[in-house]
Amino acid sequence: MTEPGEPDGEIRAAGAVVWRNGPQGIETALVHRPRYDDWSLPKGKAMPGEHVLLTAVREVAEEAGVRVALGRRLATTHYFAEGRPKRVDYWAGRPVSPDAFSPGTEVDALRWLPLVAAAGQLSYARDVTVLDGFAAGPADTTPVILLRHADAISRKTWRRAGHDDDLTRPLSAKGQADAHALGQILGCFAPGRVLSSEAQRCVATVRPYAALRGAVVETDPELTIGGTTAEPTGPCWTATEAARERVAALVAGAEPVVICAHRQNIPWLLALASAALGAPVPNGPALRKGAFWVLQASGGRLVTAEQHLPSSADRPAPGPSPGSPGAPPRRSATTA
């Protein structure tokens, strides 16, 4: 993750390896750009203030004509374009809308090709490396998203206002803005269940996302700080056996899920989810308010893990992903 400003002048961009099941197995979408006369993976530059996940989904829709649900994190490419360093973040992308490609001035052709044929068609070695990374792991994955609630009115301010019940403490103005932003950002992944602590600040954090998805926010006492299901043990909280079973069942269900909880119990949620997926706890800083982990699973195993902030300053922190073999050099270029 990065701080606002990007002082190095780096161009930020994002895209996806868009895939579908074809007659000969998995196919991927390549786009032709007449300006460069090249074949590449769908991608494009971030708009000012745009979150990188939204960039990936928007650019794929604009170039390939399909909306995708983002899957596992793939490689990041770095090169120079227009005399400036450029970073392009990639994800796997499964189409969730009908194909509506229309030739234009920026992209005039789209091809769906089997992976081997696609590698031969791509114009740049860096794109082949990204495609190789995709081919090295499962195409389809299920997201388990662990979200720390957005910024709330302070406990001291709430009590001074005469409120004794901490579970009713609401989001601050910043927290409300981040919750609305998260509604769009979380929508970049496959939709699923929405679970939350019973605390108002947690429910309010995922309410905009649930509303956009037509989902119901399911509150769970096992996720709630301040209830009777967990006892404080220093900086973290100790999960009850019921909580452990609850989390293990959610992760093992092979169904997308967003879980919103607290600073105190996010660490054990991450530990329990990782254990249920047969993996060590991924490395990463403690989540800030409104930040989230995305665990992508396949076959009951953890495939990738990444962190995101709710702001446009976010730069995804890559998690464990299968290694990919190098690719032979293609036509060299410094623009894309």
Image: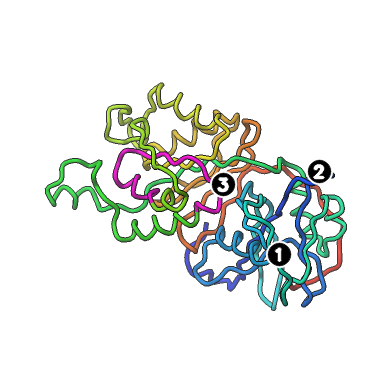
Residue 174 position within the rendered picture, expressed as x and y whole percent measured from the top left = 33, 60
Separation (CA) of disc 1 from disc 3: 22 Å
Residue 103 found in image quarter: bottom right
Element type where label 3 sits in the image: loop
Residue 28 is left or right of residue 1, and the answer is: right
Q: Amino acid at mark 3?
A: Ala
Residue 259 position within the rendered picture, expressed as x and y whole percent measured from the top left = 44, 40
User: Which range is magenta?
Assistant: 186-207
Residue at which label 3 appears: 190
Element type where label 2 sits in the image: strand
Separation (CA) of disc 3 from disc 2: 22 Å
Q: Amino acid at mark 1?
A: Phe
Residue 271 is left or right of residue 254, and the answer is: left
**Which callout, 1 or 3, points at the residue further toward the start of the chain?**
1
- Is residue 199 in the magenta section? yes
From the viewer's perspective, is residue 150 above or below residue 31? Answer: above
Residue 5 position within the rendered picture, expressed as x and y whole percent measured from the top left = 49, 70
**Which callout, 3 or 2, points at the residue further toward the start of the chain?**
2
Residue 235 is left or right of residue 294, and the answer is: left
**Which callout, 2 or 1, points at the residue further toward the start of the chain?**
2
Residue 40 found in image quarter: bottom right
Please say if the residues under marks 1 and 3 sit with CB atoms less than 8 Å apart.
Answer: no
Quick one: label 1, few (<14), some, or many (20+) residues within 10 Å? some
Quick one: label 3, few (<14), some, or many (20+) residues within 10 Å? some
Residue at which label 2 appears: 25
- Is residue 192 in the magenta section? yes
| Residue mark closest to the camera, 1 vs 3 | 1
Residue 218 position within the rendered picture, expressed as x and y whole percent measured from the top left = 38, 38
Q: Amino acid at mark 2?
A: Gly
Q: Residue at x 39, y 36 (%)?
A: 265
Residue at which label 1 appears: 101
Q: Residue at x 16, y 42 (%)?
A: 164
